[in-house]
Amino acid sequence: MSDVELVPLQRLSGADLDVLAAAHRRALDGLLTDLGFELVRRFYASAARSSHLFGAAARLEGRVVGAVVGTGQPDEAFTAVASPAWRFGLHVLRHRPQVLPQLAVSWLRPAHAEATPDKSAELLYIFTDQAARGHGIGRRLVSWFMHEAKDRNFDYVTLSVEEDNAGAIGLYEKLGFETWASGRREGRFVRQRMGADLRGGSP
Ligand SMILES: CC(C)(COP(=O)(O)OP(=O)(O)OC[C@H]1O[C@@H](n2cnc3c(N)ncnc32)[C@H](O)[C@@H]1OP(=O)(O)O)[C@@H](O)C(=O)NCCC(=O)NCCS
């Protein structure tokens, strides 16, 4: 799929963001997906305007088929999604009360609080649409993120991945990631922390 182009998030149109948010929800099982389309879209729209969130979408024949996004300030990653707090709280209570237990766990004990050295960029989300998988798009997206992180003077890229997600773990290992911690229970998920040293070597 050589005709895949990677586009930084800030260059996406409103229609691209709609497609991206819907594709994110189809591909990724997790808290943001459970919060619903509107908040997923708000997350990517905020990432497109942000100075600390950075990412790119993969476009094939004009259509978004994947994306990667992350930040050096994971504590601030969802500020735009969750503010104002009263409106976010009301939205969750009204439309998604079932996510409250997972929300509490992820909020009180965020994964990036562990196994994260200084000068790390946290890769928050990466996905490729089901129909476009196995053609190197995921590899290109993660590589893009690593290069961008290096350009922004980060020394490491860190991430959390569910322990049974063999596809994603295989992809990360091929790109030089190592497992730094495992068996981390976060609500209904059991995850491992992985990291790549952008300078070469271990932390
Ligand atoms: C993980 C994911 C992004 C891979 O995207 P992709 O575009 O298919 O990845 P690529 O084609 O670039 O594959 C790169 C490498 O990943 C590995 N890989 C990808 N899918 C795999 C699978 N199902 N099983 C084992 N290894 C797999 C392979 O080692 C592959 O290397 P190769 O090209 O030398 O064979 C995609 O499967 C996906 O979106 N999954 C759902 C969302 C997700 O789990 N995201 C990660 C959350 S932490």
Image (spheres, helix red, strand yellow):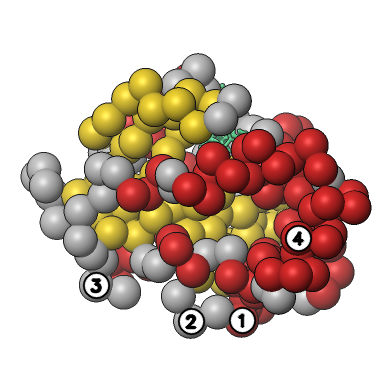
Determine the CA span between mark 2 and mark 4.
26 Å
At label 2, counting other C-alpha atoms closer than 10 Å, the crowd grade (few under 14, some 14-19, many 20 or more) is few
**140 with respect to 128 (left or right):** left
Residue 108 on image: x %, y %: 48, 48
The answer to whether residue 134 is left or right of residue 148 is right
Q: Which residue is mark 2?
A: 51
The answer to which of 11 and 1 lies nearer the viewer is: 11
- Mark 4 or 3, nearer chain start: 4
SS for callout 4: helix
Please state which amino acid type lies under the numbered disc 3: Asn
Q: Earlier in the sequence, mark 2 or mark 3?
A: 2
At a point 25% along the width and 55% down the height, the residue shown is 156
Question: What residue lies at 50% left-to-right and 32% top-to-bottom?
Answer: 186
Disc ID at residue 153: 3
Of 63 and 32, which appears nearest the observer? Answer: 32
Mark nearest the camera among 2 and 4 is 4
Residue under numbered circle 1? 49
Q: In which quarter of the view is residue 31 placed?
A: top right
* Disc 3 secondary structure class: loop
SS assignment at label 2: loop
**Alpha carbon distance from label 2 to label 1:** 7 Å
Relative to 80, is 70 above or below? above
Residue 89 marker:
4
Q: Residues within 10 Å of mark 1 (few under 14, many from 20)?
A: few
Does label 1 or label 3 sit earlier along the sequence? Answer: 1
